[in-house]
Amino acid sequence: MKVGLTYDLRSRYLSMGYSREETAEFDKEDTIFGIENALLSLGFETERIGNIDDLVHYLSKGNRCDIVFNFSEGMHGFAREAQVPALLDAYRIPYTFSDPMVLSLTLHKGMTKRVIQTMGFQTPEFAVINRTDEIADVKIPYPLFVKPVAEGTSKGIGKASIVNSFEELRCSCLSLLLKYKQPVLVEKFLSGREFTIGVLGTGKDARVAGVMEIIHLKNSKVNIYSYYKKENYLEYIDYKILTDDLAIKGSEMALNIYTQLGCRDGGRVDFRLDENGVINFLEINPLAGLNPIHSDLPIMWRKQGLEYEQLISAIIMSAVKRCKDKGKKQTLIDVEEPLAVENER
Ligand SMILES: Nc1ncnc2c1ncn2[C@@H]1O[C@H](COP(=O)(O)OP(=O)(O)O)[C@@H](O)[C@H]1O
Ligand SMILES: [Mg+2]
């Protein structure tokens, strides 16, 4: 089976003139190499395709593969993560991970929180600031937390994210609006423990892959998992696998959120406790980082004594199973046999 790889190689964007920060979410060669190697050792044939531009050329030249292992984050717009999957859907080529609808929704943390709330899950009270004049309308009590609405890898998250007054809120919102040219999410600041939960599989086959607490070491000035700390995690962060009651409660919540949103093959859900110890949803990552060494999901996996290759195997086998179930055609829902029979009556 030939597996095409779609990804955004960071060095390529850097050589095109994009900054280190603009490309922070993109993958280094060792991530692509790691995934490729794991797939080869699992017996798949692989072909590197590249980013959306490469995919357009690849398809227009008539090239095809059996399935795509997609981990392209994309560069432009709220649908950036959805662009490669949308193109693959149009060409009826199966691929790993979630569909364009899920990827567009979850990239926008504000919209995702609205959906999560209607599903009945706890998430911090929030406001989305689109324009500077909306800052004065925020009525949530301080301290607050501000972040760009559609970034990952903690881009735009640092000390100035925690705000304690209207002046600080105004200042942080203005600088994020200017720098990231997208709305700002303002949330109640959660001061409690933080953990992330890995999920693998799809629908009724979805299962928790691990629960990992992000412990901020004593040398941390503020307890936020910032871009700087993610880059320097050996110095600032301790990761701990949890199996206690909190892990059990969080796992149920993560699995429900993941399946109800319709995520596929694998992902990660981030949570934090509020001052009363209540679990709050922060965000979901249906394209979780897969660097074999530095990304949270592989770290969590490794900490449980599991091999990286097994993680990639679980992801690709979930996608292969979905395609087999549907005779390679991607359908919009998992149609169960009894329903089909019911409809015929
Ligand atoms: N409302 C909040 N209260 C406290 N800390 C937060 C809040 N939102 C985010 N954080 C901190 O910022 C980090 C990154 O935020 P997150 O929304 O997960 O963005 P990213 O997509 O960049 O990972 C979190 O892991 C957490 O440490
Ligand atoms: Mg996160």
Image (cartoon, rainbow, N blue to C red):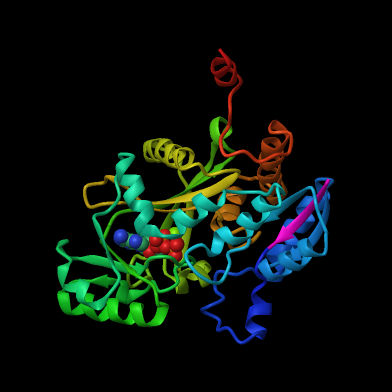
The location of residue 271, given as percent across then percent down, is: 38, 51
Q: Which quadrant holds the N terminus?
A: top right
| Outermost residue, front side | 345
**Left or right: 336 in relation to 68:** left
Residue at left 16%, top 75%? 166
Image: 43 above or below 149: above
The location of residue 79, given as percent across then percent down, is: 51, 62
Q: Which residues are magenta?
A: 1-6
Q: Is residue 258 visible?
A: yes
Taking the magenta stretch, the answer to whether it contains residue 72 is no
Residue at left 16%, top 68%? 137
| Closer to us: 291 or 98 | 98
| Outermost residue, top side | 345
**Left or right: 159 in relation to 81:** left
| Closer to us: 345 or 83 | 345
The location of residue 316, given as percent across then percent down, is: 70, 45
**Left or right: 247 in relation to 278:** right
Residue at left 58%, top 64%? 73
In which quadrant of the rendered view does residue 337 lie? Answer: top right
In which quadrant of the rendered view does residue 27 lie? Answer: bottom right
The location of residue 86, given as percent across then percent down, is: 61, 55
Q: Which secondary structure is most common in the magenta stretch?
A: strand
